Image (cartoon, rainbow, N blue to C red):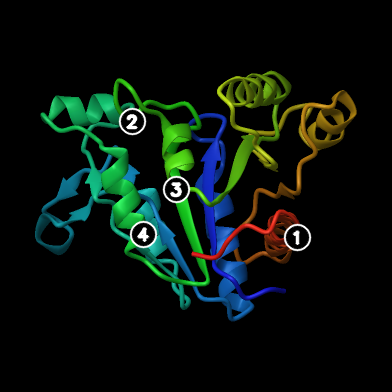
Amino acid sequence: MTQRALRLVVAGTGTGVGKTHVACALLRMLTARGIEAVGLKPVETGVTPSPELNGGHEPATLSDAERLRRAGGTFHVKRSPCSFVDPVSPHLAARRVGERIEVPAIERWVGEHAARVILVETAGGLFTPLSEETTNLDLAIALRPCELLLVAPDRLGVLHDLTATLGLAAARGYRVSHVVLSSPAVPDLSTGFNAAELTRLGVARPLAVYPRADEHDAATLASATATFEAIERQAASFQVGAF
């Protein structure tokens, strides 16, 4: 494995599709392999302060970034610089408190961190608005050079969701190369068959299917390993520059 730095953006086809589960698994796997990694979630909504935790400076319900930060190991996740109370789209949450999410500011913040792997998890789906003019895709573009990993749920509807998301990204001039599936809380008759069907239809060739299991689980870590190694191979083939 090469030792150049890698910036990995983890986005999804929507909200609640398993991005944090995949991010946790990747960070756990990297730590187990002795690879320095930092997890960043620059934008987060639905973070509610509570007087019961740390004098009101900790969320009553742990956010995704906080869950990652507290997960242990040698990696860590920084607190979100754009953190909002309302559990709505980031651009709406920011607007309600008179703020605006600026992609260049996030780009600078991400650039302040150095590690072998910089993992950036987005808020919501790939086309979730960060402002009236920008989406998570614009953030991924601003963070280039990077590898974009798109997470989709292994459930009914994923054939459409991935076709639509990948198609719109391509129409806007961005080719998404890396896709993984994450098993849903409630499986349906398509769960376990979607990866093969996506490949057969030519929609995408998922790098891995993450089980509904703890990030310490052997099967979860195996999926993370397969994901990371595939991304590394493709990044090396395109000779992506170091940071």
Spot occupied by residue 84 in the image (x, y as percentages of width and height): 22, 39
Q: Which residue is mark 1?
A: 233
Residue 129 shown left or right of residue 126 in the figure = left
Dot 1 amino acid type: Arg
Dot 4 amino acid type: Gly
Q: Which residue is mark 2?
A: 130
Badge 1 marks a residue whose secondary structure is helix
Q: Which residue is mark 4?
A: 111
Q: How many marks?
A: 4
Spot occupied by residue 29 in the image (x, y as percentages of width and height): 62, 69
Label 4 with label 1: CB-CB less than 8 Å: no
Residue 123 shown left or right of residue 33 in the figure = left
Q: Gap in Å between the C-alphas at discs 4 and 1?
A: 24 Å
Q: Residue at x 71, y 53 (%)?
A: 238
Residue 155 visible, this angle: yes
Badge 2 marks a residue whose secondary structure is loop
Q: Gap in Å between the C-alphas at discs 1 and 3?
A: 20 Å
Q: Which residue is mark 3?
A: 143
- Image-quadrant location for residue 87: top left
How crowded is the residue under tag 3: few (<14 C-alpha within 10 Å), some, or many (20+)?
Answer: many
Dot 3 amino acid type: Leu
Q: Please state, as top left, top right, bottom left or bottom right, where the N terminus lies in the image.
A: bottom right
Residue 152 or residue 140, whichever sits in front: 140
Dot 2 amino acid type: Leu
| Closer to viewer: mark 2 or mark 4 | 4
